[in-house]
Image (cartoon, rainbow, N blue to C red):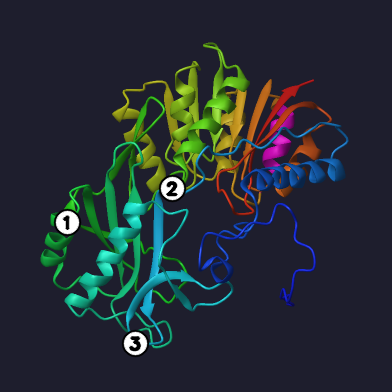
Amino acid sequence: MHFGKILEFINKSTYRIEADCTTYKRCGGCNLRHIDYEETLNMKQNAVQSLVNKTLNTKINTNNTIGMGNPYYYRNKLQFPIGIDKKGDVCIGVYANRTHEIIPLKECMIQNKTSTEIAKKIVDIIKKYNLSIYNEKTKKGLIRHIVIKNGLNTNEYMIVLVINGNKLLNDKNIVKDLTEKYEEIKSIIVNINKKDTNVILGDKNITIYGENYITDKLGDYDFKISPLSFYQVNPVQAEALYNYAIEESDITKNDIVFDLYCGIGTISLFLSKYAKKVYGVEIVSEAIKMANENAELNNIKNINFIAGDSEIVFEDLIKNKKILPDVLFVDPPRKGLDNNTIKNILDIKPKKITYISCNPASLVRDLSKMEEKYEIKVIQPFDMFPFTSHCEVVTLLELK
């Protein structure tokens, strides 16, 4: 791999701005922090449009990217590794781009402010009780990661301390120190991860304070968020995206809707109000457990959540159970849809497909396989992760 280095600017772009973050160059998280925000939205639209122009026969213009009114401090999930800095002090931060060296954190412009504050307090507590820090090379030491989740609209916080061991020493004192200072902390969990791995969370959670979940409100619905379940990291934009996708899909009370890759059921719940029946499918069984709890929490009766591989469950529903969707929602991982699912979609021909994508390249590849039978009505980018190169896209397809 080769990397370039900027030595001097001969002529600066009018869109180049002074980055407002001291660590951004080394962290690599917000790789567009030196560009005017409005211009980053144009860049995302252009990136999607050029993929469309290159790959699709359909001549369609990508809509302007829908950005955030306030693109700062938007993340509701913080995860920081803990290490020892060059002076021998305990530090938290982010890994420097392409390395496992921790860049100590002063402030993060995209992270919830209180979460950052609590994380710094945890570092003080670790020092106070002289807890050992995990060392990646020797595989010794106790504390590995701090994960903090917060409910934007409920102001509830969950602390997850990831340890390389079976017990957090001084846990009662740690709970007392944290909850006396921050009454918004509703849950403190010890997560056990003794594996030599890059995966942050292990499978086992021990709740040492409060509940084993927190809640957040998104739109009209309450959601339970557990340590392991996925929840949209930018709830402001998530709500805007869901409302847009559902409005444009124009679902009626006669429609059966499938929601493949449904996670903890966020879109399924939003859909339930408009549809006759919703089937949500997700491979992570913990997420389906949460999805069922979320449906119950909101007293929703017309959703059926199924745990399993979307490809297999989808085929089972349409071929064996003979349940056919009028409208299909898909929100696949970065790799997009598999060929078998696309073949099944083209066989059963739902009248509408709403494709939510976190990777425009795999989205456009999948659209090229469906554009013969489906008219692409709209391609709408959303800025879910401001100042990063990530782009979320909502695409609507109608059967020709």
Q: Are marks 2 and 3 in contact (CB under 8 Å)?
A: no
Quadrant of the rendering where the C terminus is positioned: top right
Secondary element type, mark 3: loop
Of pointers 1 and 3, the one earlier in the residue sequence: 3
Dot 2, how many residues are within 10 Å of its Cα: few (below 14), some (14-19), or many (20+)?
Answer: some
Amino acid type at image mark 1: Lys
Amino acid type at image mark 3: Gly
Amino acid type at image mark 2: Phe
Give me the disc on residue 88: 3
Of pointers 2 and 1, the one earlier in the residue sequence: 1
Point out the frontmost of discs 2 and 3. Answer: 3
Toward the viewer: 56 or 372? 56
Compute the Cα span from label 2 to label 3. Answer: 35 Å
Q: Note whether 254 is above or below 200 in the view shown.
A: above
The magenta stretch spans which residues? 336-347
Toward the viewer: 214 or 366? 214
Tell me: 98 left or right of 186.
Answer: right
Residue occupied by mark 2 = 230
Q: Note whether 285 is above or below 21 in the view shown.
A: above
Query: Does 57 appear in magenta?
Result: no
Which percent across, then down, holds residue 44? 70, 46
Q: Are marks 1 and 3 in contact (CB under 8 Å)?
A: no
Residue name at image x 58 percent, y 65 percent: 28
Quadrant of the rendering where the N terminus is positioned: bottom right
Which percent across, then down, holds residue 267? 49, 32
Secondary element type, mark 1: helix
